[in-house]
Amino acid sequence: MKKIAVLTSGGDAPGMNAAIRAVVRAGVANGLDVFGVKGGYEGLINGLFVPLGTRDVGGIMQRGGTILGSARCPEFKTEAGQLKALRALNGAGIEGLVVIGGNGSQTGNYALHKLGFPVVGVASTIDNDLVGSDTTIGVDTALNIALEAIDRLKTTASSHQRAFLIEVMGRKCGYLALMAGIAGGAEYVVLPEVETDPEKIAEVLASAYERGKSHAIVIVAEGAKYNATALANYFEEHRERLGFDLRMTIIGHVQRGGTPSAVDRILGSRLGAEAVNQMVKGNYGVLVGEIKGDVVTTPLKEVVDHPKQLDPAYLELARILD
Ligand code: ADP
Ligand code: F6P
């Protein structure tokens, strides 16, 4: 193998640049020519390859986002789109592809693998919804951004004796919400994985005030059956009976932006470099992730076939620490 390419896909994540840098530098160290693909699978379909040398990836580690750009590309979900991408790769003489991204991106990567192209995945998404990695690149930064917002909201909540609904990202996965709830000292966490009863939340909030708390914080995962907007509407409809002075904040995309944490830079560097090692060894069709502190590979088939479960120990911790 002489030529490989690397792309970033799906929602961007802080630390993706560290992973790109590691792929390029580990690739060069292994005697490979490395190309970047501009704009995820969209760019792959259109053959947007740029040569990347060691110096091209200097000074990017501390930058959020991805220097290659990312995209949601519906065309790549079709076989016709995947075949176009394959033609572009073959046309440019590229013999291996590293895909840095989340669940959807690795499903696309697996599609290329099934078409016989040598691929390796790198686990990167703020959602932490990938089997094959305890945490994915971007999660630590996103969690710290959410925590900063929660800490700030708590001070104003306290001054006014208010309850706050704070919504965090995560798509269908409640990991970010659960961890933000534990680390942010929330009274309640609303998750997609657990049935929500708004009346139960009202009870928990009332009990928090009865126990002398000056504020009550509910962290809501955006993918929960009742997101923050739905819950706020519920509390508004039953305002007289439930009697809460409630405010809602949706943290949103700010969680994906800005400087990557040390944890994400290191994780990006380790996983990116290992993706190249696996490529060189000929271990294709795998996701590179980190489990129990070790960098490991998991077949993409297993990754895309199994939804990631929340650790019940953390669910219990959130319950008892409210
Ligand atoms: P993420 O990788 O962050 O989960 P998406 O779910 O949006 O983000 O996926 C990113 C891209 O991966 C999609 O825009 C699409 O091009 C590709 N993709 C997603 N799902 C599939 C699929 N089932 N088959 C092929 N490609 C897919
Ligand atoms: O997958 C990362 C993520 O930030 C999710 O948490 C969120 O649901 C989604 O992307 C938002 O997508 P977009 O940036 O396309 O609005």
Image (cartoon, rainbow, N blue to C red):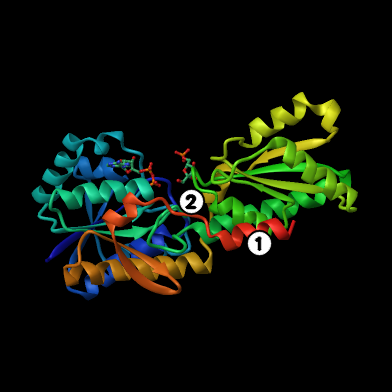
The answer to whether residue 58 is visible is no
* 196 or 81, nearer to the observer: 196
Picture coordinates of residue 203, whole percent (x, y): 79, 42
Residue 152 or residue 39, whichever sits in front = 152
In depth, the one of 137 and 25 nearer the eye is 137
User: Could you give the CA–CA distance between mark 1 and mark 2, rounded to whole angstroms?
Assistant: 20 Å
SS at mark 2? loop
Seen at 55% across and 55% down, the residue is 142
Residue corresponding to mark 1 = 317
Q: How packed is label 1: few (under 14 Cα within 10 Å), some, or many (20 or more)?
A: some
Amino acid carrying label 2: it is: Asp
Residue at 71% from the left image edge and 32% from the top image edge: 232
The residue sitting at 78% across, 51% down in the picture is 154
Mark 1 and mark 2 residues within 8 Å of each other at the beta carbon: no
Q: Quadrant of the C terminus?
A: bottom right
Task: Determine which residue is flagged by label 2.
Answer: 127
Residue 14 in the image, given as x and y percentages of width and height: 47, 57
